[in-house]
Amino acid sequence: MKHIKLEENINYDGSQIEPMWAFKNFGIKDSSIVSWIGPMGIQPDHLIDFEDQGLEIKGDNLVHFMIEHFDIQPADIRLCYHRQRLFVMIIKDVLHGMGIETIRSGDDLYFNTMNKKGKLSVSIATCSISSMKIHFALNLTERGTPDDVDTAGLMETGVNIKIQDVHDFRELACSKYITEVSSIEMDISKTRVF
Amino acid sequence: MKHIKLEENINYDGSQIEPMWAFKNFGIKDSSIVSWIGPMGIQPDHLIDFEDQGLEIKGDNLVHFMIEHFDIQPADIRLCYHRQRLFVMIIKDVLHGMGIETIRSGDDLYFNTMNKKGKLSVSIATCSISSMKIHFALNLTERGTPDDVDTAGLMETGVNIKIQDVHDFRELACSKYITEVSSIEMDISKTRVF
Amino acid sequence: MKHIKLEENINYDGSQIEPMWAFKNFGIKDSSIVSWIGPMGIQPDHLIDFEDQGLEIKGDNLVHFMIEHFDIQPADIRLCYHRQRLFVMIIKDVLHGMGIETIRSGDDLYFNTMNKKGKLSVSIATCSISSMKIHFALNLTERGTPDDVDTAGLMETGVNIKIQDVHDFRELACSKYITEVSSIEMDISKTRVF
Amino acid sequence: MKHIKLEENINYDGSQIEPMWAFKNFGIKDSSIVSWIGPMGIQPDHLIDFEDQGLEIKGDNLVHFMIEHFDIQPADIRLCYHRQRLFVMIIKDVLHGMGIETIRSGDDLYFNTMNKKGKLSVSIATCSISSMKIHFALNLTERGTPDDVDTAGLMETGVNIKIQDVHDFRELACSKYITEVSSIEMDISKTRVF
Amino acid sequence: MKHIKLEENINYDGSQIEPMWAFKNFGIKDSSIVSWIGPMGIQPDHLIDFEDQGLEIKGDNLVHFMIEHFDIQPADIRLCYHRQRLFVMIIKDVLHGMGIETIRSGDDLYFNTMNKKGKLSVSIATCSISSMKIHFALNLTERGTPDDVDTAGLMETGVNIKIQDVHDFRELACSKYITEVSSIEMDISKTRVF
Amino acid sequence: MKHIKLEENINYDGSQIEPMWAFKNFGIKDSSIVSWIGPMGIQPDHLIDFEDQGLEIKGDNLVHFMIEHFDIQPADIRLCYHRQRLFVMIIKDVLHGMGIETIRSGDDLYFNTMNKKGKLSVSIATCSISSMKIHFALNLTERGTPDDVDTAGLMETGVNIKIQDVHDFRELACSKYITEVSSIEMDISKTRVF
């Protein structure tokens, strides 16, 4: 499993959640995480969460993670949501290491201090028969986020976060996730079963 | 999925990791977490982690969690290890809420301050064809832990933890885990797939 | 798993077999049975059974059951058809308890007395990667059923069936099915495996 | 899938539930039902149902069905219990065709008339990683059944059942079950999925 | 599993890879291989291999094999690719028996002699949730194959291959594959597991 | 997946087929092939093939391959037998490249020339819930093989095979198998599914 760190500023319109996006666009075979920084404006026909129907999901500047797993065949959305939760918890941990405390509820992270409260992240998991996909994105700024939701931006939390910190954060979060998934495989091969 | 909070002081000798232990001893059908406080001294023939062969795994006083899942058929040790990781991360979070900072590496939690360093926990996951099991235990004290490992006890971390706090911790950790697993099921039923 | 008893008179046009219909229309998360009374006229592009291509599947008044299961991930059409058979057998049993004898062949129920012979029911099962769906419907009357098939209606069998009996039948059949599926889960957790 | 109709009078001691029994004793490869008539006296270490621990499970004369499926890999005890339920419902149906009304609760059949009430059957399902097994047996007589359970025997129900009828019943029940399982496979191959 | 040997000259345009094609066109239920001789010209929207996007996949005369498996539920593209490899290796073996040496790389067969080098075959595997499909085709002639690929035709290898040999080859390859898959099922039912 | 080439002369007594043998003896985590040269004398209680019960399975000098896969969870004996067949076909191919023609039937290789006929190999596949195992061994010599079976030894086929050739053969066969399994994973990630 590889982390591909894109330099380009891609707009997340929801099409990137489709299976094989990484292969079709970057020729990546095998499981992968692609990360980049860019805006978000999800087209209604790319909505994955039926609860979001009719809502605007958008923002001017987010750090995006697009994960695809091919190791489980057939793909299993239950396992995929377990991995999404692991990823969100790892993000929370890495933010904590940067001095940013967040609150997690399911797959959402919230910022909650006296000065600032708001939803930091959006996330969804889905699958086709052969591929499991996870999108997770963190607002860097509140600009362009929906008016009817209290949001927060990572670079506006009062903690001094520079763009290089965001790059380091991408690196560290992905590396920790890849290590985690791989450590589970190692644990399996030393475990007695009944 | 239910949490059964035992009052008795049971010795964890490793036999509790066997499938259906909760049913055979407490008549519990369905998935469950059983928690209790007690010593640990694992019998060699109850060892699950082949890496532990020849090692002593023991302690005088730990808080134990014994999880059994029947929802996945056939049982899947990979998913089981994902749930173990979720559980450990939830424990870490709850401890953080109690003012105790820990470091996680795979399924282990470590205490690491200037005054005190050491391994706080032991954990293993395993399965039979029909049942997935997770054992997780936290030292309350260092007493009785192996001499050749640096260990730490939850009640000796410098943070003021009373026995009632340990009970509250059991309650909260289990309730958060049960909610997490159930929230994943709810997420599945609102997700568009390809 | 819940039974949602609709009061409305919905036309079954085949779109209801689509995954997540219950969530999208009634906000139901989790596995469910939705039952209602209404006509049927399946649109060709909603046909699930390729053997039915070119046939008319219709009727003026039927009692409909729309089942969705999310508990098995990934969804398994083989298990889904096993559940369909269980459901049809439970229906047959409940009808027997009401004094109506039927003959079952696969997923079809037939009425067969000296006075009246004919197909009572239609049924199909299908799935997406994350959801298993079963539709089962019983003619209440022969009116509007295809001319080229011998059909029968539940309220025209010679046994005195009132509309309240149909409501009780809905209730009882769904409750027995939900109990059955749940009793299987309980049986798993008390079974020794090899 | 074949039905092997044994002529011998075999004692069911519980060892027959072990995977590959049919292959080891009769050289049968592939899925199979073996049926025979004989007594039952389950050895405690062959108990499969942990709820039966400490109970006597016995009888002097029963008709036994021992089913083994290899088609699902890895074996799935949930699917196996679904098939057990289908088998019991088919038995109930065949008995109904012979004029014997029974009541089903889970995997048990009961006889319940003014003159005679009692449990007619015993059943269990289990599996190894590669094989799914179902045992189902009907008392032909009450003789030798446990004292502390109300039992009934098929040949003592007041309906005139001769031993040839029992043979025909074996034949018919197995043939209907084999047809049912095979009809599900045929249904799969004509079903549109999402 | 049956082999259906079509006499017609069908153009392979890629639509035949769709699940249930054999049922919809020939009424075949159950797993099957359909073989025929005919041209190939894949429509871009029927492309399965994303690596082929933008390429022409065509030829004037090929022997085609279209395999569909329903035995694994849910379908598993990993197992499907294993079966594809088995099929290609069996083809290689049968060609070897006819005096034609080929080289295999993944799912491709190459002809490689002093006089003639070139790609002999095209192949792809895919699946829906309920069906696994494999297409494999061998050029009989180079005519009509893409200009930018070195290809070879079975009837132009220097070995004397008549059209009747091609028919015998179809028969033999399919019969060996069906026997192989079935021998695996038999092996399962005599294997001790842990 | 790694190939571990043992230098020691190990006796294959059947215990090596047990899950986790590679981890317990060589500390190998992850999927692996271990190969070595040595005698074989399978202990009756280590027999995996129930058809072999009562037979002697032995030889004085064989090249052994012991494969373990952890990538599929839960383990699937059907897939495992597919991989066994792939492995045997790859062995056949490599031998062909060395000038040794063999005939394959299921998982057995035979030598069959005018001068010499006989069974060259033994093989079995099995699994636990978390691990799939394949043993394959080729006689280097006929010495010590059972009297009641016609056997053949690789170094006695008339083709000039030196011990270094056997080492090269081990290397090449394992490397081709590892490449094959990995090429399937790559193919999955470029395949459109339905």
Image (spheres, coloured by chain):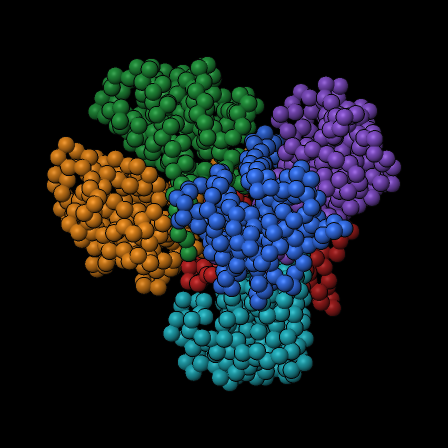
Chain colours: A green, B orange, C red, D cyan, E purple, F blue
How many numbered marks are there? 0
**Residue drawn at (35%, 49%), measured in percent from left and top?**
B49
- In the rendered image of this protein, does residue A189 appear above or below residue A125? below
Residue drawn at 73 percent across, 22 percent down: E150
Q: Is residue D194 left or right of residue B171?
A: right
- Identified at 36% across, 49% down, the residue is B50
Q: Position of residue F56 (x, y in %)?
A: 57, 63
Residue D114: percent from left, percent from top: 52, 81
In terms of depth relative to the viewer, which is nearer, F169 or E84? F169
Horizontal placement of A117 versus D144: left or right? Answer: left
Camera-side residue of D54 and E150:
E150
| Residue E25 in the image: above or below residue D122 | above
Vertical placement of residue B164 versus C175, above or below:
above
Establish if C132 lies above or below D113. Answer: above
Residue C89 position in % (x across, y down): 59, 61
Q: Quadrant of residue C167?
A: bottom right
For the point 27% across and 55% down, which residue is it?
B42
- The C terminus of chain A: image quadrant: bottom left
Of the pair E119 and B172, the residue shown nearer to us: E119
Residue B78 percent coordinates (x, y)? 43, 44
| Image-quadrant location for residue E12 | top right
Residue F180 in view, yes or no:
yes
